[in-house]
Image (tube, rainbow, N blue to C red):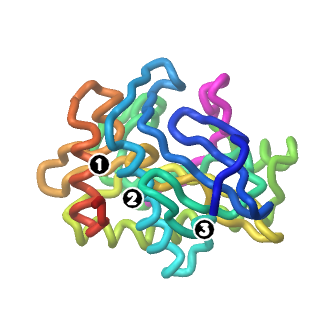
Amino acid sequence: MEKASELYSGKAKSVYASEDPDRLVLLFRDDTSAFDGEKTAKLARKGMVNNRFNAFIMQTLESAGVPTHFEALLSDNESLVKRLDMLPIECVVRNITAGSICRRLGVAEGMELEVPTFELFLKNDALHDPMINDYHIRAFGWATDEEVVRMKELTFAVNDVLKRLFADAGLLLVDYKLEFGRFEGRIVLGDEFTPDGCRLWDAGTRKKLDKDRFRQGLGDVVEAYEEVATRLGVRLD
């Protein structure tokens, strides 16, 4: 499948049209950013690692009954995906406290939560992705009530699958962000699932193996991503 015109270029991925109007080509670049684009860098191999990592996770979720937009790997940095009508909503599940929940609620990092929390955010970098709730979504028409229910169901289904997957690899799934879209009248998982959009810690040492290494200047960002991929059995060659 050949890519055609560029439709969108984000902070770390670009989206291209393809010869099929219902399919897109997703290009994972070596760019990385944090703090809504205030901190940026190019990291060699990052696009390749994230592309292959995402393919592995999406295929794992599909096998578990979670519908995703992923179709096939096209190259080291490119994947074929379904063309979704994306919803401007981020669904976040937290199993352990880290990041913004610590700042907002004044709690320490690393608390294991008795039950996972679910939060909704508006996807808008200019507004720093403000937290929203079901009433905002209904009032502004960003999604229907039924679609919100379905997104919650799928987000927790992802948690059930991936907590076990990462635990078997000696990793803690701390939290993660998901984005969804519409495809042929149903809600489908879109965007990506990589260490860019989740927090992963070593289960024994709690060493951070995700994008916090970039945010916090810890170094060895791509090396950490590769370590996670290797533990999961993702092929990077």
Q: Are marks 1 and 2 in contact (CB under 8 Å)?
A: yes
The residue segment tinted magenta is: 116-130
Name the residue furthest top.
38
Name the one closer to the observer, 140 or 208. Answer: 208
The quadrant of the picture occupied by the C terminus is bottom left
Could you tell whether 206 is left or right of 174 in the image? left
Mark 2 belongs to which amino acid?
Phe
Residue 117 visible in image: no
Residue located beneath label 2 in the image: 53
Identify the residue shown where x is 48% and y is 30%: 104
Mark 3 belongs to which amino acid?
Thr
Q: CA distance from mark 1 to mark 2?
A: 9 Å
In the displayed structure, would residue 151 be above or below residue 90? below
Confirm whether the magenta stretch covers residue 122. Answer: yes
* First-in-chain label (3 vs 2): 2
* Helix, strand or loop under label 1: helix
Name the one closer to the observer, 147 or 196. Answer: 196
In the displayed structure, would residue 86 be above or below residue 65? above
Residue located beneath label 3 in the image: 68
Identify the residue shown where x is 22% and y is 67%: 169
Q: Crowding at label 2, few (<14), some or many (≥20) Cα neighbours within 10 Å?
A: many
Confirm whether the magenta stretch covers residue 214. Answer: no
Residue located beneath label 1 in the image: 225
* Helix, strand or loop under label 3: loop
Residue 103 screen position, x and y as percent = 43, 28
